Image (spheres, rainbow, N blue to C red):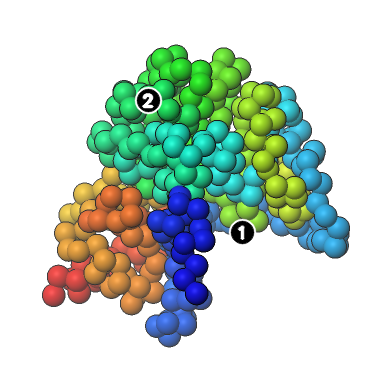
Amino acid sequence: MDAEHLAVPGVRGLQPYQPGKPVEVLERELGIRDAVKLASNENPLGPPPAALAAVRAAAGQVARYPDGSGHRLRHALAERLGVGADQVTLGNGSNDVLELAARCFIAPGDEAVYSEHAFAVYPLVVQAVGGVGRVAPARDYGHDLEAMAALVTPRTRVMFIANPNNPTGTWVEAAALDRLLAALPREVVVVLDEAYHEYVEDPAYPRGHALVGDHPNLLVTRTFSKIYGLAGLRVGYGVSSPQLADLLNRVRQPFNVNSLGLAAAEAALGDEAHVARSRAVNGAGLAQLQAGLDRLGLHWLPSAGNFITFHTPQPAGEVYRALLERGVIVRPVDNYGLPDHLRVTVGTEEDNHRFLAALGEALGAAGA
């Protein structure tokens, strides 16, 4: 039976999100034993020791359902951010909160605005609920907030802003964001995706949680997958007005964050030393990768995240496959409108060195 016609219209044309190739898959396919994955923007240091200890302590209770309200983690986040616990919405990763926003605020035929080269999940969640995506051309590979505002119509319900943006690493300054928020109708929910915000130290960078009190239509999404190293446990959250949070919680699935994730995230939140160390390792790794790409004569995009996207002189697909043959997994970004670029995650110093050496060989192989 052809089941395609059974799906709702928004789902029929969707292409599933493509995650980075797992190490075990590459090793099985090519018989490689020591592959390194630099494709999914994971923390090379892993999680804080306190988070692992919390997982072990919570493991004995996995026969029981987790706290469906996430009381302890929500209150810990609220205290850390200076907001009310009723302003925090927990998600199965921040992707879950992005989907909650689409389900909550976008009806079939409604519009959502996002940027060219922005995170691939935005068009997925919009189309899945029958919404219409309106894409603003990028400026220097980043968000052009004026162009995005110009796309707003009476049918616009949501605007997605990634800050910093994946995969380009670009970010918008506080002054530009303030102007946008002041100019937009209150009927447009602004979803400010700050998955990589902990890596940014520039004082001009806006901290979204500090803005929700003045902007009741603002939803800030964050994750424990990146700098906290808990990608495998899938814990994210949103910060918004209590009114928006109440609406999001009406469509949030019960027990959407598991008990191990709740415990690990609460423990990780208190380990500021691990965050500082991760940030320092990332800064050094970015500098190492930038210098190596310069030596290879490759153009790269300045990044505020834990990754860097670079231009390939040969077809990116060929370079990607040549890297796989050398046991290095990076990320093609043709689905982001960047068919002649690849994205590489910042790894350990050894991982970065191996990538750069393999890239030099791969460029020769791809150009042969």
- Classify residue 243 by image quadrant: top right
Q: What residue is disc 2 on?
A: 152
Quarter of the image with the C terminus in it: bottom left
Mark 1–mark 2 distance (CA, rounded to whole Å):
36 Å
Mark 1 neighbour density, 10 Å: few (under 14) some (14–19) many (20 or more): few
Checking the image for residue 164, the label placed there is none
Q: Position of residue 323 (x, y in %)?
A: 32, 70
x, y percent for residue 102: 53, 39
Residue type, numbered disc 2: Val
Residue occupying the point 51% across, 45% down: 129
Amino acid of disc 1: Gly
Residue 293 seen in render:
no
Q: Is there a contact, CB below 8 Å, between mark 1 and mark 2? A: no
Q: Which residue is mark 1?
A: 232
* Quadrant of residue 149 within the rendered picture: top left
Q: Name the element at disc 2.
A: loop
Mark 2 nearby-residue class (10 Å; few <14, some 14–19, many ≥20): some
Q: Is residue 247 above or below residue 14?
A: above
The residue positioned farthest toward the bottom in the image shown? 31
Q: Position of residue 349 (x, y in %)?
A: 43, 58
Q: Is residue 125 left or right of residue 256?
A: left
In the image: residue 216, left or right of residue 10: right
